């Protein structure tokens, strides 16, 4: 897993699973804490695998953001297989999905 | 049939699953469903390691059998006894942080069973060939 932090955005690439979930969780919580009350984006366009442990990090961040009056939005993985976990858990209906922020190049 | 996979019970070892599955499913009609099968088996292995906590001297063993309709897996571990039916499933209308692993497995398989023999759990998973869109 690769992480790239920019203002209001966390870009994630590679494989996101239980092994790297603690690192992702810390990054997401920091992103939300640094942008309290506003919408932040986690760009997953470069993710090729994500499991329920990775999903949990995003859900935790979304809940914390919404509790603080903000939101955590996602850019969906370009790899359709990686999006499957959102469909199977119904989180495709819970998160707001947005295009990758135009000011940044997409995750590799 | 591909040789069984024997994994030390550690999250760090689960990266071996993908290459083993690619070899096991190569050339079979179910091969396009590789990603869904990897997700389902990965979720079970993660549950075994995190919740069953098998002794590090043991291994988690995977056997794959292919037939014309499905890919079936028999997975054994020496972790604690588990009864999936006793694990509460998430309410889709009330998003929660954890607890989605079994829900994912159940949606990808048409057989998902476990039995306890002595100190060993034996899991059976069957992934049917999708008739429509790939799983």
Image: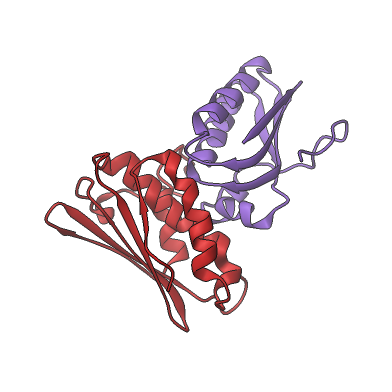
- Give the residue at x 46% y 57%: B40
Q: From this viewpoint, which residue is outermost toward the bottom? A: B68
Residue A37: x and y in percent read 67, 19
Question: Which residue is nearer to you in this view: B89 or A58?
Answer: A58
Rendered view: B88 above or below B70? above
Residue B114 seen in the figure: yes
Quarter placement of the C terminus of chain B: bottom right
Q: Is residue B106 left or right of residue B76?
A: right
- Give the residue at x 69% y 47%: A77
Q: How is the image coloured?
A: by chain
Residue B55 position by quadrant: top left
Q: Is residue B48 left or right of residue B2?
A: left
Residue B6: x and y in percent read 35, 54
Residue A94 position by quadrant: top right
Question: Which residue is nearer to you in this view: A11 or A32?
Answer: A11
Question: Which residue is nearer to you in this view: B33 or B65?
Answer: B65
Question: Which residue is nearer to you in this view: A99 or B3?
Answer: B3
- Give the residue at x 87% y 35%: A102
Residue A13: x and y in percent read 68, 39
Q: Which chain is purple?
A: A
Q: What is the number of callouts on the image? A: 0
Q: From this viewpoint, which residue is outermost toward the left? A: B118
Q: Is residue B80 left or right of residue A88?
A: left
Residue A28: x and y in percent read 60, 26
Q: Which chain is red?
A: B
Residue B135 seen in the figure: no
Q: Is residue A52 left or right of residue B113?
A: right
């Amino acid at each position: 897993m690769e992480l790239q932090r920019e203002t209001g955005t966390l870009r994630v690439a590679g494989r996101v699973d239980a092994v790297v979930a603690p690192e992702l969780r810390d990054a997401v919580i920091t992103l939300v804490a640094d942008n309290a009350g506003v919408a932040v984006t986690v760009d997953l366009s470069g993710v090729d695998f994500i499991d329920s442990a990775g999903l949990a990090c995003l859900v935790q961040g979304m809940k914390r953001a919404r509790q603080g009056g903000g939101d955590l939005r996602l850019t969906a993985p370009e790899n359709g297989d990686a999006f499957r976990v959102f469909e199977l858990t119904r989180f495709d209906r819970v998160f707001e999905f947005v295009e990758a922020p135009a000011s940044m190049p997409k995750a590799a | 049939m591909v040789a069984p996979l024997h994994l030390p019970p550690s999250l760090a070892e689960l990266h071996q699953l993908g290459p083993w599955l690619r070899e096991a499913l190569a050339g079979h009609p179910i091969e396009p469903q590789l990603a869904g099968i990897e997700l389902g088996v990965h979720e079970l292995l993660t549950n075994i390691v995190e919740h069953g906590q098998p002794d590090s001297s043991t291994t988690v063993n995977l056997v794959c059998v292919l037939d014309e309709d499905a890919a079936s897996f028999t997975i054994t571990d020496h972790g604690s006894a588990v009864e999936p039916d006793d694990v509460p499933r998430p309410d889709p209308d009330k998003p929660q942080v954890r607890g989605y692993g079994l829900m994912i497995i159940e949606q990808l398989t048409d057989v998902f069973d476990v039995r306890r023999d002595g100190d060993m759990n034996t899991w059976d998973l069957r992934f049917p060939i999708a008739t429509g869109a790939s799983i």
